[in-house]
Image (cartoon, grey):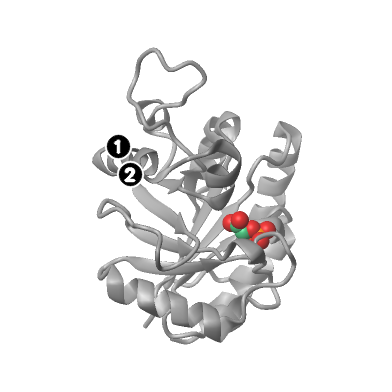
């Protein structure tokens, strides 16, 4: 049986109050859904919210891993404004690295992304490494590859599932042992279409993950997949 990864990426969204509302709604919607064993669910939230989300996950025993959306390429020291990997130990399980928005708006380049990936891996975190295609390098230290065609992100029109599958198949072939996911306008309606593709083993969801009900509808849809 395939094992799936479902990642909510909230990006730079939500206030503390909205985070609490999402968690409450998520918990109540999830109580009616049998979360399948073949699904790992991850929530990637902004740094200020990680402690409160960690506390809530632990208290309510939610089947949810917690992720950071970024991390410093350096360790501790004179790097004003940076959050280094030691600071999130005990809070998170996963680090998202190289998202196209980090590359586009913050000028992140391969060397820096490689450093982030190595530091995260050495600290014991799983790394979800985002690429826009097969030409982007993928560090050995990455555990998951998220293929996200830039034109599909936030556009409401995801890539054709078969075309996305072809890229994911090549990524799996080129980087054996890494789980390959797709991201870009995934929602509760199209999520199973992507996961039904043989080489897509997970989904990275932005906009549609901001609403806990919609995110739980995705979990429900995925729970009906049998392979
Ligand atoms: P989207 O974002 O689902 O809003 O397209 C996906 C992502 O950027 O990870």
Q: Is residue 122 left or right of residue 159?
A: left
- Label 1: which secondary element: helix
Ligand 1 shows up in the quarter that is bottom right
Q: Residue at x 68, y 69 (%)?
A: 187
Which residue is most to the top? 78
Q: Residue at x 66, y 40 (%)?
A: 12
Asked if the beta carbon under badge 1 is closer than 8 A to the nearest atom of ligand 1, the reply is no
Instruction: Tell me which label, 2 or 1, sits earlier in the chain.
Output: 2
Residue 202 rendering spot, x and y as whole percentages:
48, 69
Residue 174 rendering spot, x and y as whole percentages:
29, 71
210 or 27, which is in the foreground? 210
Task: Identify the image quadrant of the N terminus.
Answer: bottom left
- Label 2: which secondary element: helix
- Name above or below for residue 178 compared with residue 87: below
Report which quarter residue 116 is drawn in.
top left
Q: Is residue 29 visible?
A: no
The number of callouts visible is 2
Q: Residues within 10 Å of mark 1 (few under 14, many from 20)?
A: many
Q: Nearer the viewer, mark 2 or mark 1?
A: 2
> Would you name the residue on which mark 1 appears?
119
Report which quarter residue 217 is drawn in.
bottom right
Residue 136 rendering spot, x and y as whole percentages:
40, 59
> Would you name the residue on which mark 2 appears?
114
């Amino acid at each position: 049986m395939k094992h799936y990864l479902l990642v909510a990426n909230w990006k730079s969204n939500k206030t503390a109050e909205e985070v609490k509302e999402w968690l409450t709604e998520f918990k109540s919607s999830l109580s009616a859904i049998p979360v399948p064993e073949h699904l790992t669910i991850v929530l990637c939230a902004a740094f200020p919210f990680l402690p409160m989300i960690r506390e809530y996950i632990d208290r309510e025993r939610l089947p949810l891993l917690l992720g950071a959306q970024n991390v410093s390429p350096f360790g501790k020291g004179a790097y004003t404004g940076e959050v280094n990997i030691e600071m999130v130990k005990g809070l998170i399980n996963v680090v998202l690295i190289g998202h196209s928005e980090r590359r586009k708006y913050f000028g992140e380049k391969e060397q820096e992304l490689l450093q982030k990936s190595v530091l995260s891996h050495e600290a014991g975190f799983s790394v979800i490494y985002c690429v826009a295609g097969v030409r982007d390098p993928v560090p050995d230290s990455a555990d998951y590859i998220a293929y996200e065609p830039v034109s599909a992100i936030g556009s409401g029109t995801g890539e054709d599932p078969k075309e996305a599958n072809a890229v994911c198949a090549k990524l799996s072939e080129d980087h054996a042992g890494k789980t390959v996911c797709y991201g870009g306008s995934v929602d509760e309606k199209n999520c199973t279409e992507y996961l039904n593709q043989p080489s897509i083993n997970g989904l990275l969801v932005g906009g549609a993950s901001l609403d806990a009900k919609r995110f739980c509808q995705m979990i429900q849809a995925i729970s009906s997949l049998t392979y």
